[in-house]
Each structure stands twice: as C-alpha cells, then as structure tokens.
Image (cartoon, rainbow, N blue to C red):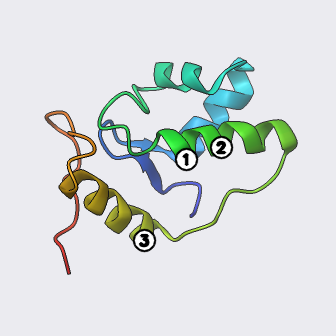
Amino acid sequence: MELDDTICYCFHVSQRKICNYIRINKLRRASQVSDCGGAGSGCGWCIPFIEKLFDESERRGEVQAISADEYARARGSYIRAGKGKPPAGATPPPAES
C-alpha cells in the first residue's frame, strides 16, 4: 500500500496520516491511534493494520503487504460476513466480484 492509501474507510484516514500521528505524538499504545480522526473506532476492519503500522513504526520497518485494491476488497468481505458495521458516512465496500 502507498502512504496516501486509505487505512480507515469509516473515517477516511490515510496510512500517511496514521504514520505521522504515531511519529509526532510518540504514541505508547496502538489503541491511541483512535485519536487520529477516529481511525479504528468504526467497523473494526483496520485495527489489525493499525496495530501493524504501530509495531512497524517502533522497528522502523515497512508495511506494504497488500495493494490498496486488495485491502478494500478484503474489507468488503469482512463487512459482508457481518464482522463489523461501518458508521454513517463511511466509504461503502466495493461490490462483490
């Protein structure tokens, strides 16, 4: 994924914004990222990715395991499986293919 790709579709928060928020605010726990525009407090899909970004920020590694399209499709499957409910105003998941 690229830095400007969306991580939290519920609240439209990019990877760049999350990474900068972690770095600038010197967060101690991944759960504190929710103060960054609500990231991770909607349907729950992005929580594992936020935790991974947090862990990688401490190790100065890279997090680019999947493409933005794959990420969006996987979130759609997660929501359709009933594992999370996006709030009003969230980016809707892509249609099933």
Q: Nearer the viewer, residue 94 or 43?
A: 43
Among the 4 quarters of the image, the one containing residue 38? top left
Residue 50 lies, with reference to residue 29, above or below; the image says below
Q: Where in the figure is residue 97, as x and y percent of width and height?
A: 20, 81
Q: Nearer the viewer, residue 17 or 57?
A: 57
Looking at the rendered structure, the kind of residue marked 1 is Phe
Looking at the rendered structure, the kind of residue marked 3 is Glu
Assess disc 3: are there few (<14), some (14-19) or many (≥20) residues with their C-alpha within 10 Å of its C-alpha: few
Q: Nearer the viewer, residue 35 or 86?
A: 86
Residue 70 lies, with reference to residue 90, above or below; the image says below
Q: Where in the figure is residue 76, as x and y percent of width and height?
A: 26, 60
Marks 3/2 in contact by CB < 8 Å: the verdict is: no
Marks 2/1 in contact by CB < 8 Å: the verdict is: yes
- The residue at which mark 2 appears reads as 53
Secondary structure of the residue carrying tag 1 is helix
Q: Where in the figure is residue 15, as x and y percent of width and height?
A: 55, 47
Q: Which mark is residue 40?
A: none
- The residue at which mark 3 appears reads as 70
CA gap between label 2 and label 1 equals 6 Å
Q: Is residue 94 left or right of residue 1?
A: left
Q: Nearer the viewer, residue 53 or 12?
A: 53
Secondary structure of the residue carrying tag 3 is helix
| Mark closer to the chain start, 3 or 1 | 1
| Mark closer to the chain start, 3 or 2 | 2
Q: Which mark is residue 49?
A: 1
CA gap between label 3 and label 2 equals 17 Å
Secondary structure of the residue carrying tag 2 is helix
Going 33% across and 46% down the picture, which residue do you hit? 9
Going 35% across and 42% down the picture, which residue do you hit? 12
